[in-house]
Each structure stands twice: as C-alpha cells, then as structure tokens.
Image: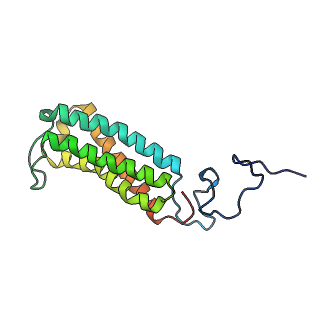
Amino acid sequence: MIRPLASPHGRHDLPRRVSANTPPSVRLTKSRRGRQTRPRSHVVVAAFWVAFVISVVHYADNFFNYDAYPQGDALGVPPPAAGVVICSWFIFTTYGLLALWIARKGHVRLAALPLAVYSLSGLIGIGHYAVPGATSMIWWRQLHVCADIACGLLLLVLAARMAWGSPGHA
C-alpha cells in the first residue's frame, strides 16, 4: 500500500476541500473549474517588499534630488513640494503594511483595499511622464521610476485578485 505524503502540518491526508481553516501551504492557486483564484500569500508578501525597496529608492531620490526631476503642471495639476513627496511615501507605506497585517489575520478580501491604495504609490509615478522633459532624465532614474510604476501595477492586479478571487484561496 502506498502511503500519502505527510503535509507540513503533520497530517497524512490533504484536505479535499479548501476551507478557511486550511493552512496557506496546502491551498491551491487555481481552482479545478478554472475560475480565477486569489494569489498565494507569499507572492503578495514578496511583491510588497520588492515594491517597498524600489519605492524607498524612488521617493528618496525624488526628495533629495527634487530639482533634478522635471517640473511643471501635469494635466493642470502643479507639482507636489518635496515635503509632500516624502510624506506621501509614509502614508502609502502605512496602507501597504496595513494590508499585510490584515491579510495575515486571515481577512484576505479586506486586505485588498489597502493594498490597492498602496499600489498608487508606484502608479503615481506615471505623473513624471506627464511633464515635458521626463524622458531626458538619467537612465538609472528612469529605471527606478519605471520599476516603481510596474510594481504599482502588479500590486493593483494582486489586490484585484485578492478581492474577487474564489473564496477559500489565499
């Protein structure tokens, strides 16, 4: 007789149905019916910390080298002051950390909203390119601005999947 592999939680049989009590390490990311499901928690956590590191570089550079960024109205909105830039980083990051904390408590759908707010931290970088001269910034500045935008997009997609994925998958 072939014995099933033990799960990391000491059980010899994996659950047939995923429930709210199923440990994250045993949960599936794709449903058997092909429905959209929520991303695994380690993917969300890893994406958050990558976005966090990139945002530190981007926002610190934007604050300390404020004059190196092209200035001007973006779609009729005046550029934020350097102090507003750094304060917004702390506000956005608070939302991101709140999302991780709520998700860790098991409220994945509820965590999607603060994660979506945190994603704006990167997506707002699109505003740099609404000002003439943004494409003439030095290559490494372009790199971290574009990486921050990409991370914002990724976090927004993950937040949407967390909010509207099948129940029982985290």
Visible residue check, residue 63: yes
Where does the image place residue 119, in percent across and percent down from the top left? 33, 51
Quadrant (top left, top right, bottom left, bottom right) of the C terminus = bottom right
Q: Residue at x 34, y 51 (%)?
A: 95
In terms of image quadrants, where is residue 48? top left
| Above or below, 30 relative to 3 | below
Where does the image place residue 169, in percent across and percent down from the top left? 56, 60
Residue sitting farthest toward the right: 1
With 40 as the anchor, is 140 left or right in this view? left
In the image shown, does 134 or 67 lie closer to the viewer?
A: 67
With 104 as the anchor, is 21 left or right in this view? right
| Above or below, 39 relative to 168 | above
Visible residue check, residue 143: no
With 65 as the anchor, is 37 left or right in this view? right
Where does the image place residue 13, in percent across and percent down from the top left? 76, 55
Where does the image place residue 49, in percent across and percent down from the top left? 41, 41
* Number of numbered callouts drawn: 0
Q: How is the image coloured?
A: rainbow
With 125 as the anchor, is 163 left or right in this view? right
Q: Residue at x 34, y 38 (%)?
A: 54
Q: Residue at x 11, y 54 (%)?
A: 77
In terms of image quadrants, where is residue 158? bottom left
Residue sitting farthest toward the front: 105
Q: Residue at x 47, y 46 (%)?
A: 45
